[in-house]
Amino acid sequence: MNARLSLLIGGLGLALTLTACSSRYDLAPPPGGPQISVTIKVPEGASVKAIEAKYLSDQCFPPQSGPFNSYGSEVLKVKPQRQGDSDRYEARLDLDGGSICRWRLATVTVGVKYWRAGLLDLAGSMQEDVTALFNVDRQPERLNELPEAMRTRKELLLTAHYYPYVAGAGSGSAVIRFIASGSDYAEGPAAERLVFEPQVESKFVARMSQDAQGEYSILYPDGSRRPAETWHPDVEKLDAIRLGALPSR
C-alpha cells in the first residue's frame, strides 16, 4: 500500500471516528418521551419566527462557565406550523434531549417579526423583533429555590403589549423598536403548554424628535411631548393613552 493511499484511508477513518463520536453527544430525544407544546398567536402583518429551544447539559464539556454553574448547551431551531387558516402557530418540543449528555430543555425563545416597517404603516428600518422567553429548566437544585405556585404551573401565558417606537427620525435614519408593557418572561419547570399572544399596538406609536436647538423629546400618540430623559418612552403613559385614561390633546 503506497503512502498516499495509506494517508487517504487514515483520514477517512479519522473522519468516521469523529462523526461517530460527535453523534454520541448530539441531541437525540428518546422516542415517545415527554414533550411541551408551544403556541404563538401572530398579529396581522407579522410573520412567525423559528422557535429557539435551548438545551443544557451538566455532563458534556467544554462548558460555558458562569458564576454559579458550568454546563454545555445546544440550540435547536424549530419552525412552528400554522393551524389551519387561523393566526396560531404550534410546535412540540422534547423535554429530554437524550444522548450521553443528558440534554434537558431549559429555555424557549419565541417571537414574531415585521419584515418591513410599511406593514405597521411606518417609515424606517425594523431594528428588532417582538420576542419573549420561557424558562422551563427542571434542574433539581433550581427547583427548590422556586415558590410552589411557580413550580406547579402547567401553562405559561405571555400577553404583553408592544408599542412601536420610532427613534432617530430627525437624522433621516429612523429605526423602529418595540417597547413592552407587561412581562415578556415566564418561568415554570412543570409547564406543559407555552402560549405567546403578543399585542402589537400599531395605533399607539411613540416617536423621538429633535428641535432646532438640538434638544430631543418623545412625541406620544395623544400629541403630548416630553423630554427624552431616558431615551425610552414612558410605558405607563402609553398604557394610559391606550386605555383612555388621559384626555386627548
Image (cartoon, grey):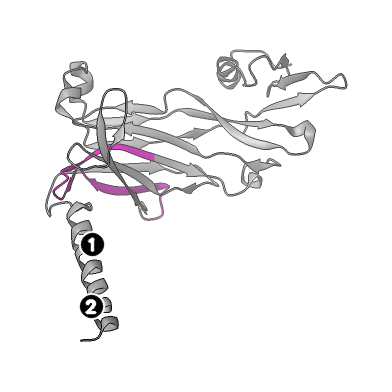
Q: Please report the residue visible at 23 percent of the width from the left and 73 percent of the height from the top.
A: 10
The residue singled out by tag 2 in the image is: 9
With respect to residue 33, does 223 lie above or below?
A: above
Which residue is at a point 37% across and 33% down the rendered structure image?
A: 133
Q: Earlier in the sequence, mark 2 or mark 1?
A: 2
Image point (76%, 25%), residue name? 209
The residue at which mark 1 appears reads as: 18
Mark 1: give few (<14), some (14-19) or many (20+) Cα within 10 Å: few
The front one of 106 and 211 is 106
Q: Is residue 102 above or below residue 142?
A: below
Q: Is residue 108 magenta?
A: yes
> Is residue 65 rendered to the left or right of residue 239?
left
Question: Which corner quadrant holds the N terminus?
Answer: bottom left
Query: What amino acid is labelled 1 in the image?
Result: Leu
Which of the 4 image quadrants contains residue 211? top right
Please identify, in this view, whether the residue under mark 2 or under mark 1 is nearer the observer.
2
- The answer to whether 104 appears left or right of 197 in the picture is left
The quadrant of the rendering that contains the C terminus is top right
Q: Which residue shows up at 29% across the image and 41% down it?
A: 73
Percent position of residue 3, x then y: 26, 81
> With respect to residue 153, does 102 lie above or below?
below
Q: Are marks 2 and 1 in contact (CB under 8 Å)?
A: no
Q: CA distance from mark 2 to mark 1?
A: 14 Å
Residue 111 picture location, percent across and down? 44, 41
Q: Main secondary structure of the magenta part?
A: strand
In the image, what residue type sits under mark 2? Ile
Q: Which residues are magenta?
A: 84-109
- In the foreground, 63 or 14: 14
SS at circle 2? helix
